[in-house]
């Protein structure tokens, strides 16, 4: 399970799912499950990786607050959700594709 950038792969998948749910007509439950998945993926990434830059930590933390399923934040319209999901997807893809970053999992 602990492959290189595993957490960012989860965030990228959850962000892609969030974009699909936002851009298509799906029941509300799908949006809720996407929130839960995105929140858990971000928390897994923050806890599991210790070599995150401050900007990366801040962006992941802010995204986790926005996708928090316990106290849902309503961003208003789909443009805001598309923006947040795109930023999360972009950061994740940069981290996944960046070969020079030595992200190591935190020791158990």
Image (tube, rainbow, N blue to C red):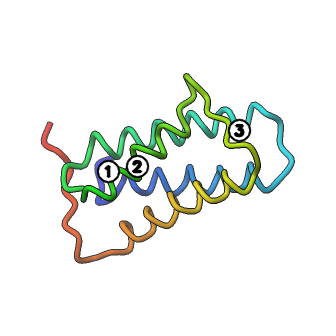
Give the number of the disc on residue 105: none
Give the number of the disc on residue 31: 3
Of mark 3 and mark 2, the one earlier in the sequence is: 3
- Identify the residue at horizontal 83%, vertical 43% (top origin): 26
| Mark 2–mark 1 distance (CA, rounded to whole Å) | 5 Å
Please state if 20 lies on the left or on the right of 10 as rendered: right
Residue 48, placed above or below residue 16: above
Q: Choose between 38 and 71: the one closer to the eye.
A: 71
Image quarter of residue 102: bottom left
Question: Under tag 2, what secondary structure?
Answer: helix
Q: Which residue is mark 2?
A: 60
Kindly indicate whether the residue at mark 1 contacts the one at mark 2 (C-beta within 8 angstroms).
Answer: yes
Of mark 3 and mark 1, the one earlier in the sequence is: 3
- Identify the residue at horizontal 57%, vertical 28% (top origin): 69
Which quadrant is home to the C terminus? top left
Question: Under tag 3, what secondary structure?
Answer: helix
- The x and y percentages for residue 30 are 73, 37
- Identify the residue at horizontal 48%, vertical 37% (top origin): 65
Give the number of the mark in front: 3 or 2. 2
Crowdedness near tag 1: few (<14), some (14–19) or many (≥20) residues, C-alpha within 10 Å:
some
| Mark 3–mark 2 distance (CA, rounded to whole Å) | 19 Å
Q: Which residue is mark 1?
A: 57
């Amino acid at each position: 399970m602990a492959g290189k950038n595993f957490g960012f792969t989860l965030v990228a998948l959850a962000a892609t799912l969030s974009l699909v749910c936002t851009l298509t007509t799906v029941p509300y439950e799908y949006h809720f499950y996407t929130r839960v998945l995105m929140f858990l993926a971000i928390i897994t990434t923050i806890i599991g990786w210790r070599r995150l830059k401050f900007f990366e930590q801040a962006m992941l933390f802010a995204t986790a607050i926005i996708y928090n399923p316990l106290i849902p934040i309503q961003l208003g319209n789909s443009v805001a959700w598309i923006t947040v999901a795109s930023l999360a997807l972009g950061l994740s893809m940069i981290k996944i594709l960046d070969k020079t970053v030595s992200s190591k999992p935190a020791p158990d």
